[in-house]
Image: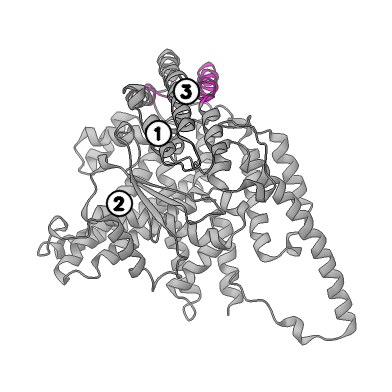
Amino acid sequence: MSVKKSCIFLLFSTVTFSLIFLFLKLTDVRTVHSFQALTDRFFQEEVTSSTLTLHYTLRDPQVYGISDIPVRYNATTSDVSTAADYLQQLTDLDPSCLPLSDQITYDILLYLLNQDLSAQNFSLYAEPLGATIGIQAQLPVLLCEYRFENIDDIHTYLQLLSTTDQYFSSLLSYERQKAAAGLFMPDSCADDIIHQCSTFIEKDPSLHLLVTVFNHKTGEADFLTESEKKDLIQQNLDLVTHHVFPAYQLLIRGLENLKQFCQNQKGLCCLPQGRSYYEYLVRASTGSSLSVDSIQNRIQKQLLADAADCRALLKKSLHSTPVSSISFPEDPKEILSDLRQKMTEDFPQPPSTSCTLKYVDESLSGYLSPAFYLTAPVDDLNNNVIYLNPAANYNGLELYTTLAHEGYPGHLYQNLYSGSVLSPLRSLLSFGGYTEGWATYVEMMSYGYASESLPADCIASVSLEQKQRSMMLGLSSLTDILVHYRGLGREEIHTFFSRLGVTSTQAADALYDAVLESPANYLKYYLGYLSFLDLQNYCRSQWPDQFTLSGFHRYVLEIGPCPFPVLEKYLKLCYTHSL
């Protein structure tokens, strides 16, 4: 960690103090060992919860003592008593006896376990499906990116594929339970998922993405004989035909049948306990301890500030070159290289790595995000992939800032830097508010990098784009709250946007459907961004003589992904101890 160790012990040399210090160190050792045993067990349980989690977290599980794990998409639903047991063991330990890095982990686990226990009353409110970020939409990419390093990997993959229909059956069973409780998703969400599933399986199985990619990877596997390749290729085609396609067909039929049981076409707050669930979901998704009312106020404050900046920039940009006429790099690799070079003054030097750029397949492009980054295994940070979605048709400034979000200094850089200093457990734990907030925060900074080599008459136009991007995310996040916490329906959202000058009901509908599908999703990005912005401003004002942007970012990255109250606590400690 970057916190300097106190030198106070050097001022004392008496025998009495030395004996006391020795006793304290012995106590520390016992506490550290107990905490290590607890976190090791927690890590093993989490990382083996599914074959995909294990595969994408560890390249070599045996180094961590993990072997002979059942092949499965996911484990059974976690037991509340398990979380309570871990929480009891955790609170029996004195965190002040732990090294600083372990104190951070302690606080994070304390936060997560309490969060898990608070979710026990909402077991049927979670929604695993969704046309864009649902399990069935994300799964094909995870299957395509499954590494084949030996024949055991391929056999595990094929075994996993053979359980796809069983897994989707369990998802459908959960949806039936939701429907029986009056909690089934709105019709528009079900229709979008049905259409996404139908699009995914409309091709002949022999031409399908999961077949062509498998054939290519298997064909390049030098550890296989030609006979083995032919046999495995046939096995995969059979499994896609008889297990994957039927899984998506099962989901389509099941959702069509369940639509009749939908009792709510609006946001979460219109469900029993819906407002309480949304409050929980916002805390869990963003890692923020702010109330929804406080979050709404913070968003509205930023929107007003951005609107004022937009008015000022509009006056300047009247005589500026429009963004559409400015030439930006178009080659994604060139953009990533440019960003890596321009970020050097503001961020710590990133470790060396490689990154593969890929494009979303046509069968998925209509629904997946415009771009996304696949995290590398914690024991192989050199294996990074960024996907671009051709359907987004990004170019120019949009492509530049998108690659800043996904690459440098966004997800790729943050995962690489933090992953190189954090324990495997810390790298496994997910905090969307931190990771998506960080990526959005640096995306906003990248507009400045894009302006660095431009003529003066172009800068106002680029700055205006940045403010408009911020406002778009702010309005999307505000809409999320208005729909899921305030209860506004589709027509009321139309009215809300028409008052803001947005007359396109099609645009308002698209946003309404997006927030209906994924409650609190926009808040991960935008509230996370604002939280980093507020922390930066706070540290800059509290420690003006020692504040540097690069130093601030180094502290944030070395503390690593965590809830914002934990990040704030240890940021203050970093600055206080470096005085």
Residue 519 visible in the snapshot: no
Q: Amino acid at mark 1?
A: Asn
Q: Earlier in the sequence, mark 2 or mark 1?
A: 1
Give SS at disc 1.
helix
Q: Residue at x 45, y 49 (%)?
A: 295
Q: Residue at x 64, y 59 (%)?
A: 104
Q: Main secondary structure of the magenta part?
A: helix
- Span colored in magenta: 162-191
Q: Earlier in the sequence, mark 3 or mark 1?
A: 1
Q: Residue at x 73, y 44 (%)?
A: 86
Around disc 3, counting alpha carbons within 10 Å, would you say few (fewer than 14), some (14 to 19), or many (20 or more)?
Answer: many
Q: Earlier in the sequence, mark 2 or mark 3?
A: 3
Around disc 1, counting alpha carbons within 10 Å, would you say few (fewer than 14), some (14 to 19), or many (20 or more)?
Answer: some
Residue 138 % position (x, y): 43, 35
The image quadrant of residue 134 is: top left
Around disc 2, counting alpha carbons within 10 Å, would you say few (fewer than 14), some (14 to 19), or many (20 or more)?
Answer: many
The image quadrant of residue 241 is: top left
Q: Nearer the viewer, residue 114 or 76?
A: 76
Give SS at disc 2.
helix
Q: Which disc number belongs to residue 471?
A: 2
The residue wearing badge 3 is: 239
